[in-house]
Image (cartoon, grey):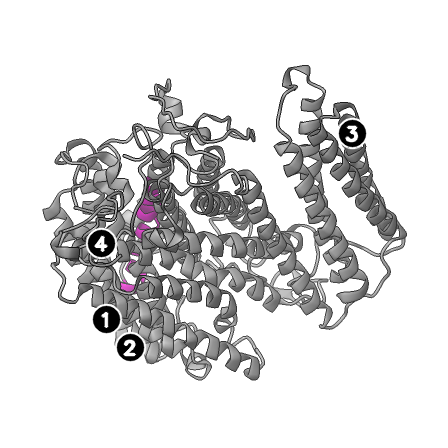
Amino acid sequence: MMTAVQANGPQRIHRHKFTLWVAMGSMVMMFAGLTSAYIVKKNQSSWLEFNLPMLFWYSTAVILVSSFTIQMAFQAHKAGEMGKYRTLITLTALLGISFLVMQIMGFMDLEANDIALTGSRSNSAASFLLVITGLHMLHVLGGIVAILYILFRAYNPAKKAETSLPVELAATYWHFVDVLWIYLFIFYNWIG
Amino acid sequence: MSNEAVLHAPAAAGSLDHGHGEHHEHHHHETFISKYVFSMDHKMIAKQFLITGMVWAVLGGLMSVLFRLQLGYPDSTFPWLEDLLGKWAAGGKISPEAYYALVTTHGTVLVFFVLTAGLSGTFSNFLIPLQIGARDMASPFMNMLSYWFFFAASIVMLSSMFVETGPFSGGWTAYPPLSALGDASPGSKTGMDLWIIAMALFVVSQLLAGLNYISTILNMRTKGMTMTRMPLTMWALFFTAVLGVLSFPVLFSGFILLIFDRNFGTSFYLSDIFINGVGALPNEGGSAILYQHLFWFLGHPEVYIILLPAMGIASEVMSVNARKPIFGYMAMVASMFAIAILAFLVWAHHMFVTGLNPFLGSVFVLLTLLIAVPSAIKVFNWLTTLWRGNIRFTPGMLFAIGFVSLFISGGLTGIWLGNSALDIHLHDTYFVIAHFHIVMGVASMFGMFAGIYHWFPKMYGRFMNNTLAYIHFWVTLAGAYMIFWPMHYQGLAGMPRRYYDYSVWESFKQFAELNQFISLVAMIVFAIQILFLFNFFYSIFKGRKVTTENPWGSNSLEWTTPINPGHGNWVGEIPEVHRWPYDYGKDGKDHITQTTPIGADESHH
């Protein structure tokens, strides 16, 4: 028998990274389904037009910045600058949490302006905004959990010598939820 | 990333160790819990999927026997039914509510729990690592999670049958408003809540599973196993996983909107509704059709999620037992690819009578009829594989041939139904029931049986009993045609599906005896499946033992493992692959396994 254990050379994409990409494709399908439903619904009767809360503009800026910080954190981790890495990854987690808080406050603004999101007075325009944005927030929350996980590992002295793969996975996913939000933001404002 | 690393790395970690040539003898400490319950061995997870699927097949099949009793003998009473179902069969007659609950649960369970989880769950898990030459899945931990999400879904679905208001009863498609309004019917209350929770868990299970299958097939093939050297089962299961990963999320988004309509008063699907006893509802502007779009965007690919594994299994089993190369390997792959693409472009043919724009309908007619092309290519290739083959009629082979027979007879009526003009007449009649039960239901069951009979020796190191298997095959094949063939005539005569009692309709009284006949055959076929289950479980413990590694003389990699492979599949190194798996009868040799290097004197390769 020939010695043949691995088919894949080191240049191939890591299987966890690959799985993540397929999973992101799957999430894209979910949001594509929802935004298609939004378009279908919008072209029917009784659709309420309203402006997005101002806070959504600020939250967009926040999540954009957090994409930069996590990328820099990943670079720092690869370069072995653990101090810088810890600062940046902590900053990313904080930005992520403030993004979620701003989204929630944005919805509270809408409710305060008498745009019902749920219940018998609600219009599906607002309900769609809640459902789609809410699902995106859950995905961001998943990203925050992943970041907190690698953050606690970063402060754990027993886990010194480790590869940057978990950081890279978290960064890839974080960029994904960032791009997804920007898509949704553009969609709400100018497409849908 | 080496296969060794998969077994030894902790599940969630991402250590970047490189492959190493030396091998270890595995002496895992395995407890009962880690070996049989929370197992991360793909082979054990496959068996868990299979046996859970069997439990559901018995329950779902029993439900069909119960509602066939009502359809076949609408005027009779069966006192034992009251003992079994209690208030749902007061006086020995199934109540209308119970009838709808049985029909709904039968559909949901068979489509999702048996033919999705039980079929692709079993064979993806069992065959992917074995046939591509991997020690396990890309992520054994996710694989285990996938089973346990399915298990949780099963428990929730099962519990819905015991709630006071009964399980969901609005049809397996769960269209709103019946599914969105608790006041609409008894089954729309707690039963629907549990239904949707179970289905959400099921979607999660399928996504975890599908991600793993795709990642494993693309990343973990052994040396020499190029994509075009994979057995067709691998291609089929790969396309199945892709379909699932891309379509289940859309169903999920439809469910989320449904949950909001049910529980938070939104109006995605609801508009202008008046419920008897409740009054007018405030919901305005919703569209029930929107749900149908989201549902059928999954619903149609789901048909191929069910059918493709059966096609792959039939191809492999047929080539092995005809002792001939599969005819048109690349055409088989290409036609499965075409089916996978078209699966996403035909969903509205389920919606021709929803008021769909007729022009749009005609586009969907064209795309639907296009599926006939790859389907016909596959049928042609199966028949030409059999042609002048040295056929061994093993039980697996019989079921593979039976699959082709059913696929042809069920597929032809698909061409009828794909035409919107005909569909307007046939929609929601027994013609549709006949069509999809033959082409998707029974055909895929046959693929599953073919797979079980063929790979049972690999699963348990024993053979199933052939005599019982032959009885099982012939009764099931004849029975399936006797049950579903007459339904075409009923459907053409306009008999609608889902009615509780046809004897009160002047137009359908003529079918009283035919309905009785169908019910009788359904009971016999159900009883024969119990015989199959007896054979299966008896053979696990008492079946004839397998004495050679490769009892079928098959070329593919799973037969190079020990008779009872442990976790890791191969003792020592994973073999290298030198050729495709279909070198049967080449250069006068009966078969040449994939691990045999190309010889200098070979004719072509």
**Vertical order, B349 against B580 (above or below):** below
**Vertical order, B252 against A189 (above or below):** above
Q: Amino acid at mark 3?
A: Thr
Label annotation for residue A90 = 3
Q: Which residue is mark 1?
A: B514
Q: Are marks 4 and 2 on the same chain?
A: yes
Residue in the image at 34% along x and 36% along y: B43
C-alpha distance separating marks 4 and 3: 58 Å
Label 4 vs 2, first from the N-terminus? 2
**Vertical order, B250 against B33 (above or below):** below
B66 inside magenta stretch: yes
Q: Chain of mark 3?
A: A
Residue in the image at 46% along x and 43% along y: B219
> Circle 4 sits in a helix, a strand or a loop, which is it?
loop
Q: Chain of mark 4?
A: B
Mark toward the viewer: 3 or 1: 3
Q: Amino acid at mark 4?
A: Asp
Q: Which residue is mark 2?
A: B489
Mark toward the viewer: 4 or 2: 4
Classify residue B192 as left or right of residue A174. Answer: left
Q: Which residue is mark 4?
A: B583
C-alpha distance separating marks 4 and 2: 45 Å
